[in-house]
Amino acid sequence: IKPAVEATLMMRPSPAALFRALDVRRHPVLENRDAARPRRARDNRAARVYPLCESPHAVPVLRVRRIACRESNDRPQTPEQLAEVARAAVLLDGVKHAVLTTGTPNGTDRGAALLCASAAAIRAAVALPLQAQCEPPDDFGWFERLRAAGVDALGMHFEAVEPEVRARAMPGKAKVPVSYYLAAFEAAVAVFGRGQVSTYLLAGLGDSRESILAMCRAL
């Protein structure tokens, strides 16, 4: 995967204006849509925009993912470029909320430093509520830094509960035990407030009904 910025808009139809403004390449799901929309970008910038919901009642949401891969010779996108995407999304499509998500670029801050820089750049460019998503960092002090950078809410997703299920379904993420996630949730709620810290718990990966319900009660 080349360094990329993926912007996903839950929006009203027709993201064509944002494509024109950003000169970005089309996402595959739009290949059969209006032929008048731009087909390709001039370079390898990869801000990808596609509607997840065509409902006229959908709340416009910008989802931004920043990916940096060492195998690529291209330069990773900068926080300033993410801010450009966010500002255009607000001005051209009425986006009301943004979600910043990343992979796990390292085993220490687990993406928190990158999210801090990106959030600060976006908030400097446009007034847009932000949620950040990452794994629990090694230092819970990152929660204060994320909040200071402009992040309003935080998601840390442990996906499954039982150790054997986590090891099979997500061997990388399973290296961070659920107990550490729970400690991180407690520390994050103290910073962001009740109702502003979230997680995903996926049924169907192999966890028992009892394990899922017990974790829901704990959360």
Image: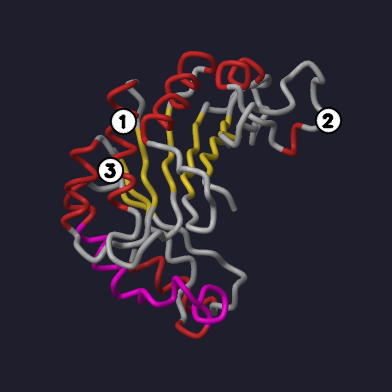
Q: Is residue 149 above or below residue 13?
A: below
Q: Amino acid at mark 2?
A: Asn
Q: Residue furthest bottom?
A: 164
Q: Nearer the viewer, residue 206 or 24?
A: 24
Q: Is residue 169 above or below residue 151?
A: below
Q: Quadrant of residue 199?
A: bottom left
Name the residue located 80 percent from the left edge and 20 percent from the top edge: 34
Is 181 placed left or right of 75 in the picture? left
Percent across and percent down for residue 81 are: 43, 30
Query: Which badge, 1 or 2, is on the more N-terminal residue?
Result: 2
Q: Is residue 110 above or below residue 23?
A: below
Q: Rounded to the nearest whole Å, what is the CA distance between mark 2 and mark 3? A: 37 Å
Q: Quadrant of residue 141?
A: bottom left
Label 1: which secondary element = helix
Query: Which badge, 2 or 3, is on the more N-terminal residue?
Result: 2
Q: Rounded to the nearest whole Å, what is the CA distance between mark 1 and mark 3? A: 9 Å
Q: Amino acid at mark 3?
A: Cys
Q: Residue furthest front?
A: 73
Q: Which residues are magenta?
A: 165-187
Numbered tag placed on residue 32 in the rendering? 2
Percent across and percent down for residue 106 are: 36, 63
Query: Which badge, 1 or 3, is on the more N-terminal residue?
Result: 3
From the image, tell me which residue sits under label 1. Answer: 121
Q: Amino acid at mark 1?
A: Ala
